[in-house]
């Protein structure tokens, strides 16, 4: 029987319990699953790619068939490079569908041999996104149960540092040019 390798590409800024739920589901149906973090120089992420990789590695250490990697460029090119046949994506609600369908069909046009497989995370994560997690954490709300403890800790550390900068404690009064949240774009 052919072994099926899948990639789960995304920004994971930060990884959430919704991502973990999908990874767990994916690990049960694919022989191998690579969580692939996009290295996107145009985005202004909260966490560096190295930090995101470390968090995802810790989160997925219990799954034998899951690994974490980073990639740049087209997802389909990366999939071919690692000999994956499937792109795994999560759909939380109908609102995700249009964007995901467009991406899946474009990826199919680029590389007809690759299949996109959509999976739904548990209902309790259907309203969860990395963007909201960042926003809630930055504004001091509770992100309990939305992200793993390790991610919560890292978020708190980041935000504490940002607040210290804002209050001038770490920069000798110098403010950072712009809070990251303002220049960051869109989505998950
Ligand atoms: O977690 P995200 O931000 O929703 O993930 C989006 C991602 C990384 C899957 C998508 O932006 C992507 O595939 N980027 C790589 C560049 C690419 O292949 N673009 C064409 C998509 S049809």
Image (cartoon, rainbow, N blue to C red):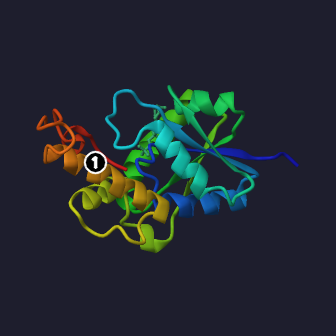
Query: Is residue 112 visible to us here?
Result: no
Ligand 1 found in image quarter? top left
Question: Few, some or many C-alpha atoms within 10 Å of disc 1 (few <14, some 14-19, many ≥20)?
Answer: some
User: Image check: 22 left or right of 42?
Assistant: right
Q: Residue at x 54, y 43 (%)?
A: 53
Q: Position of residue 23 (x, y in %)?
A: 59, 57
Tell me which corner region of the image, top left, top right, bottom left or bottom right, holds residue 128. bottom left
Q: Position of residue 10 (x, y in %)?
A: 48, 44
Given residues 136 and 115, the one toward you in this image is 136
Write down the residue under mark 1.
161
Query: Is residue 84 visible to us here?
Result: yes
- Secondary structure of residue under mark 1: helix
Tell me which corner region of the image, top left, top right, bottom left or bottom right, holds residue 41. top left
Q: Residue at x 69, y 32 (%)?
A: 82
Q: Residue at x 62, y 62 (%)?
A: 24
Given residues 166 and 170, the one toward you in this image is 170
Tell me which corner region of the image, top left, top right, bottom left or bottom right, holds residue 152. bottom left
User: Image check: 40 left or right of 79?
Assistant: left
Counting the numbered discs, the total is 1
Q: Residue at x 51, y 27 (%)?
A: 72
Q: Position of residue 70 (x, y in %)?
A: 56, 35
Q: Position of residue 124 (x, y in %)?
A: 43, 74
């Amino acid at each position: 029987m052919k072994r099926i390798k899948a990639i789960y590409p995304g920004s994971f800024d930060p990884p959430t319990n919704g991502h973990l739920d999908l990874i767990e589901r994916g690990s049960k149906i694919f022989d191998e699953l690579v969580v692939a973090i996009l290295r996107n120089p145009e985005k202004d992420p909260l966490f560096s790619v190295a930090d995101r990789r470390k968090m995802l590695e810790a989160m997925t250490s219990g799954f034998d068939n899951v690994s974490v990697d980073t990639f740049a460029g087209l997802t389909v090119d990366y999939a071919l490079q690692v000999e994956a046949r499937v792109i795994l994506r999560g759909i939380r609600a109908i609102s995700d569908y249009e964007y995901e369908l467009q991406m899946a069909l474009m990826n199919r046009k680029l590389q007809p041999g690759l299949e996109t497989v959509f999976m739904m995370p548990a209902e309790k994560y259907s309203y969860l996104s990395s963007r909201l997690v960042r926003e809630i954490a930055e504004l001091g709300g509770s992100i309990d149960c939305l992200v793993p403890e390790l991610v919560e800790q890292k978020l708190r550390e980041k935000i504490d540092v940002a607040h210290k900068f804002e209050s001038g404690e770490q920069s000798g009064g110098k403010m950072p040019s712009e809070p990251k949240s303002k220049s960051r774009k869109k989505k998950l």
